[in-house]
Image (cartoon, grey):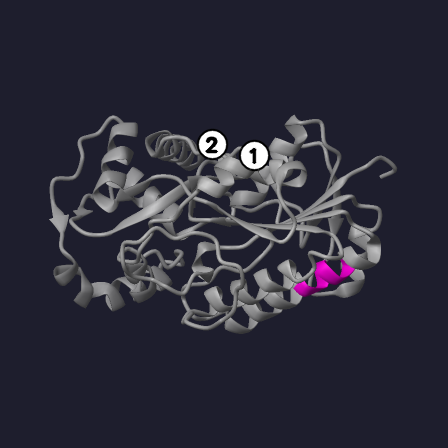
Amino acid sequence: MSKSFSVVTGGTGYVGLALVKHLVSKGENIRLFLLEDHPCLEGIECEKFIGNICNPEDVDKCLEGAETVYHIAGVVDISGKKEELMWKVNVGGTRNIVESCKRQGVRNLIYVSSIDTYPDKFGTEEKTELSHYSEVGLTSGYAITKAIATQIVLDAKDDLKVCCVQPTGVLGPDDYMGSSLGAMMDLFIKGMFPVSMNFGRYNFVDNRDMAEAMYNAVKMGKSGECYILGGEVITVDELMGYMAESLGRKKPTVKISKGLLKPFVPLISKAMDLAHLPPMLNKFSLSKLEENCNFSNDKAKRELGFKPRPAFETVRDTVLWRQNRLKGTA
């Protein structure tokens, strides 16, 4: 590729595919760093490089000549079964990307971090970006690996322009790789999740809004800075209501309490394993619903032009896309 181009890692994932489509719509030349090709990329004009970010030689070959790298690839695990892989990919792979960017003279590195890197899980105060990230105060393997990787990226600010974006709960179309929340939505669409909950809330962001903010970060972002990409905070019951309204159904009237649900969580988690479904409900996901999700997006709005859309619009588009995918039309 002789023209100026960008490399995207994790381009088939929830966030990655949204970014790829956004870059193509802007007329950008892109090279995708993939473990393997995927049908979701059909019809998208791009160069494909098959390799592994855990292999420094593959990383150097892929990044050679690139002006910008969007590093999205990572392992998300709430089951506790992929600890070693998370360290290899999230930390080791990110370190390989950073070091290769330095060697190859890449100008911009945009990294997808996570709000799980914030240690204070409870309370009601509004959370804003930190100046330093470490494993102190973090308990899950995912949070620890993402915090360490985030600091690895930030430490390279004197060698190239680096920005980290930190999404809250991601929703939107094009979830071809599968997600825990997506699996729950599929069950709801099939009529197999007819109840709601009278507890729990979370902060959601649209993957398409993320893509635009990441694109803007190349020109508008400040090196060495993190940007929280969050949207509306909605309750679990509101989420269920939005899904029902999107499908033209009545909202579930039965609401389960935490006290009633908690004893059955291990059984539900086991059933999900047996059904080969993502771990949508376990001890970890249940605790997430009670955490402080009051994240400020003021900095991203001010410096990246971040414009989160209404939560209902995101939920509607997500549910309708998933419904079409279940029908085989998406």
Q: Nearer the viewer, mark 2 or mark 1?
A: 2
The residue sitting at 38% across, 48% down in the picture is: 295
Residue 32 visible in the current orientation: yes
Residue receiving disc 1 = 212
Residue 40 visible? The answer is no
Q: What segment carries the magenta color?
A: 95-100
Q: Earlier in the sequence, mark 2 or mark 1?
A: 1
Is residue 108 one of those drawn in magenta? no
- Please identify the quarter of the rendering in which residue 326 is found: top left
**Residue nearest the observer in this picture, 219 or 91:** 219
Question: In front: 75, or 128?
Answer: 128
Magenta segment's dominant SS is helix
* Image point (79%, 58%), residue name: 102
Q: Secondary structure at mark 1?
A: helix
- Element type where label 2 sits in the image: loop
Which quadrant of the figure contains the N terminus?
top right
Query: In this rendering, is residue 110 above or below 269?
Result: above
Query: Which mark, by number, is residue 21?
Result: none
The amino acid beneath tag 2 is Lys
* Residue 32, horizontal then vertical, whole percent: 70, 45
Residue 307, disc: 2
Within-10-Å neighbours for mark 1: few <14, some 14–19, many 20+? some
Disc 2 to disc 1: CB gap under 8 Å = yes
Say what amino acid the circle numbered 1 marks.
Glu
Q: Could you tell me residue 171's position as x and y percent?
A: 42, 41
Residue at x 63% of width, y 64% of height: 152
Q: Which of these two is toward me, 233 or 56?
A: 233
**How many other residues sit within 10 Å of disc 2, few (<14), some (14-19) or many (≥20)?**
some
